[in-house]
Image (spheres, grey):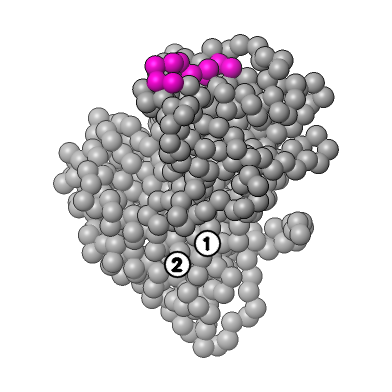
Amino acid sequence: MPRFISSAIIIFTSAILASAQNPKSPATSQNAAKETVRAIAPPKNPLPAEELSAGIEKFAFIVYGDTRGRRDGKEIQYEHSLIVESMLSTIKKMDTTSSPVRFVLQTGDAVVNGRDAKQWNASFVSLINRLTTEGGVPYFLAPGNHDVTSSAELNDPGRQDGLRNYLAAIAQLIPADGAARRLAGYPTYAFGYGNTFVIAFDSNIALDDKQFEWVKSQLESLDRNRYVNVIAYCHHPPFSSGPHGGSRVEPQTVAVRSRYMPLFRQHHVKALFVGHEHLFEHWIERYEEAGQKYRMDLIVTGGGGAPLYWYYGEPELGEYINANKESKVRLEHLVKPGYDRGNNPYHYTVVKVDGEQMSLEVIGVDWGSNYRPYVSNKTELRDVEAVAPKVKVETIAPRPEDVSTLDGIIKAFYETITGPAGKPREWARDRTLYIQDLRFVSMGMRDGKPHAEIMDHQTFVERSNDFMVREGFYETEIHRVTKSFGNVTHVFSTYEMRQTPSGPVTGRGVNSIQLFFDGKRWWIISAAWDDERPDNPIPEEFLPK
């Protein structure tokens, strides 16, 4: 409908998850054991000294994670390369705007086995060189369990091997050992740019007292008049609903919840970015302090190229909520991952900073380029005051003749938006036809590629009403193909558009409408449409004979 606008289940056993926690590869050859990790090239445009950027309040940065590939040590990470290509394009496009990309954060798991130097050299380093040289941006990597193992023991031999390779790879990217913004001997560091302070810590050792005290001291000594935005990132999420979350609570998760989350609330950290789960999800932790209400956004962005995960279930949060009841903590699961891997694409996120306000854009790549985890792929990382809609849609009872039969609901589907110039559209009646969480999908072409514009009912009303009322709009069904199974029905409804009842046809297309019958009435679940174009003719089966 343009309705005017064009445009085999894998079961993870405990053994598999255990191996993911402590990745092990076959014994490397003597040659591999002697190989050393090449350092990633320094950025062409490094961040200035911290004190020199103090007046900057508008810029952007990229966050993503979990880039390890299926053939690490043998060839370049293919899925990760798709991400890098898209990032380079984004960096180039934004470079001439008021919000250029100034750095990239990676939440860990660069390679499958960080103890194997060949995996860094053959599969990862040269990709990141493209970001630091072609893109010119600084790159900051937090350690994941695949990079340094998940051992909580600092002197664990496996951890030390992985840490040595990790630090060699990023030697020219992070503050030097012994610098004020680096914890000596640890992969734990921080930096400030403009009005934003960023801190990276090793969640594999989240119970380590020395690391915790260093992070605490960094936050306590901050000039909060300058640093109005404080960001943290690490590998393990405090809350998630993939195979590492749900009913499963890993030791690192417990440690991040019990130690770092209260610390971050105390210092009003605005956002925590994590990976570990190879998917995207968004949580909001709300809390109160001294009568003031605050929020912290928790972004899981693990779609950097590792094998994709999917939704496993909600985590048990009762104990956490109870332990933090003095702060009146409550959690909102704003975006849940999809129920299969096909709904969780490879992706990265772009964060725009504008003074004290931050916004987030999720960019899917390859087959996920139309990924829309929100109503769109963008959201504000703050509470936005509700704005009264331009067009108010009243809540009314449905007309029996509109919803009692399939013919009736399709007839009403067209009638509610049709009418002459100057006549208000029947949006309240239209709203009665749909389930509460209806989505409209307007298909079209953008930059020569198929593009889906996804809307809820109010968004569609806001975008369509002015044109329809000002110009007049008539949409008429000319053919229908109906398929049903049980109480579920799919309708392909071909339409013609005019501005007056007897005027020339201004366009044609096909509505794809999903419906169900609940025993008493019909409901429309969703509606997608595409217009006819020279390269997209309507098939004969969808046209009147």
Mark 1 sits on what residue?
Answer: 305
Report the residue marked by disc 2. Answer: 81
Asked whether, in this view, residue 384 is left or right of residue 409, the answer is left
Of the pair 269 and 127, the residue shown nearer to us? 127
- Which residue is rendered at x = 64% and y = 59% of the image? 21
Q: Position of residue 498 (x, y in %)?
A: 45, 33
Q: Residue 333: where, in percent of width, then height?
A: 58, 33
Relative height, residue 263 to residue 405 (above, below): below
Amino acid carrying label 1: it is Gly
Which SS class for mark 1? loop
Q: Residue 378's quadrant in the figure?
A: top left
User: Is the Cβ of the residue at disc 1 closer than 8 Å to that at disc 2?
Assistant: yes
What percent of the width, then of the height, locates residue 268? 40, 30
Q: Secondary structure at mark 2?
A: helix
Q: Decide which of 101, 522 is in the foreground and name it.
A: 522
Q: Quadrant of the N terminus?
A: top right
Residue located at (59% from left, 53% from top): 539
Residue at position x 34%, y 68% in the image: 130
Q: Position of residue 443 (x, y in %)?
A: 50, 45
Residue 505 counted in the magenta span = no
Per the rendered image, the range of residues in magenta is 420-429
Label 1: few (<14), some (14–19) or many (≥20) C-alpha neighbours in 10 Å: many
Examine the image and state in which quarter residue 315 appears: top right
Q: CA distance from mark 1 to mark 2?
A: 8 Å
Q: Is residue 538 left or right of residue 82?
A: right
**What residue type is disc 2 on?**
Ser
